[in-house]
Amino acid sequence: KANKDMHPKDTVVDIAGRKIGGGFFQVIAGPCSVETREQMTEVALDVKKAGAGLLRGGAFKPRTSPYSFQGLGDEGLKMLLEAKKATGLPIVTEIMSTDHLPLFDEVDVIQVGTRNMQNFQLLKELGKVDKPILLKRGMANTLEELLMSAEYIMAGGNEKVILCERGIRTFETSMRNTLDVSAIPMLKSKTHLPVIVDPSHAAGLRFMVEPLTMAAIAAGADGVMIEVHNNPEKALCDGKQSLTPQAFSDLMSKVSRTAAFF
Ligand code: PEP
Ligand code: MN
């Protein structure tokens, strides 16, 4: 169902009036994690002002260490919903377990993280949901495997899948991951689904977010997802890769000029 040969026209996913894919470009921005009501709402207002179309914020966090901040869970989700109300921006947030699905009623886009790309039970359940799914590429998965995971969701009847390249594991250790820019044109040749890029998790370093965003646009991405924090030094998660609201605003001016060029 994800195959372009069967469905040559690019899919446009509509998220509360915000279109993505088929020539429509979207910027998703917000903190890695929801930390406090004040932090979430402040960042939300800032990214909206800078021109982001959708708001992100993690409440259920898939952390590598069980001793790291695990996210605020349903309390965090409530704070994210308050930020949605305050800004009118649709929200994107990660799901870790099908048990949490009832909590996601007012979530606009459900994210499946890199670590759950092949959680087939989760994918099957999301196939029954009537909401767009942002499916991130597993850090060590091929594009064929990513497309098969999309297929799991689509086979259940939910064809609103947005693919996300977020960097893969390579032998290089100076960045957190290696952004696979080639994945963008390759995926776009194989599927009609929208393809976005997450330069924040690919780089893991703030200074690389802008050049990787430009590379993603040049390669034909349908959007980007960027981590923004009002106090990156104090962030409970991924501060090193988070942009300040000012840096995000500067990036947005560059994005609008660059996107218009392509
Ligand atoms: C995220 O976007 O919050 C995240 C955890 O990303 P990834 O699954 O790509 O590591
Ligand atoms: Mn993060």
Image (cartoon, grey):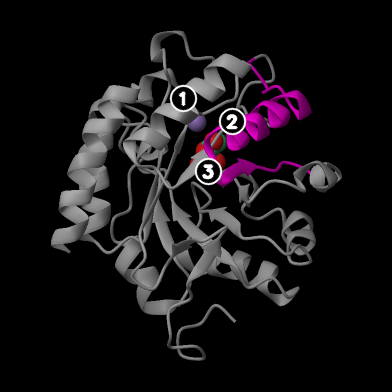
- Residue 234 inside the magenta-drawn segment: no
Question: Which quarter of the rendered picture does the N terminus lie within?
Answer: bottom right
Counting the numbered discs, the total is: 3
Going 51% across and 29% down the picture, which residue do you hit? 32
Secondary structure under badge 3? Answer: loop
* Residue 262 screen position, x and y as percent: 17, 64
User: Which one is earlier in the sequence, the residue at label 1 or at label 2?
Assistant: 1
* Residue 157 screen position, x and y as percent: 73, 75
Instruction: Please indicate whether residue 123 sits to the left or right of residue 208 in the image.
Output: right
The answer to whether residue 174 shows anywhere in this view is: no
Q: Quadrant of residue 125?
A: bottom right
User: Which one is earlier in the sequence, the residue at label 3 or at label 2?
Assistant: 2
- Residue 245 higher or lower than 128, as above or below: above
Instruction: Please indicate whether residue 251 sits to the left or right of residue 199 in the image.
Output: left
The mark closer to the camera, 1 or 3, is 3
**Could you tell me the amino acid type at mark 2?**
Ala
Q: Quadrant of residue 52?
A: top left
**Which residue is nearer to you in this view: 229 or 180?**
229
* Mark 1 Cα shell of 10 Å, populated few (<14), some (14-19), many (≥20): many
Q: Which residue is mark 1?
A: 43
- Residue 53 higher or lower than 57, as above or below: below
Secondary structure under badge 2? Answer: helix
Q: Which residue is mark 3?
A: 89
Q: Which residue is mark 2?
A: 83
* Mark 2 Cα shell of 10 Å, populated few (<14), some (14-19), many (≥20): many
**Could you tell me the amino acid type at mark 1?**
Val
**Does any atom of ligand 2 lie closer than 8 Å to the CB of label 1?**
no
1 and 2 marks in contact (CB < 8 Å): yes
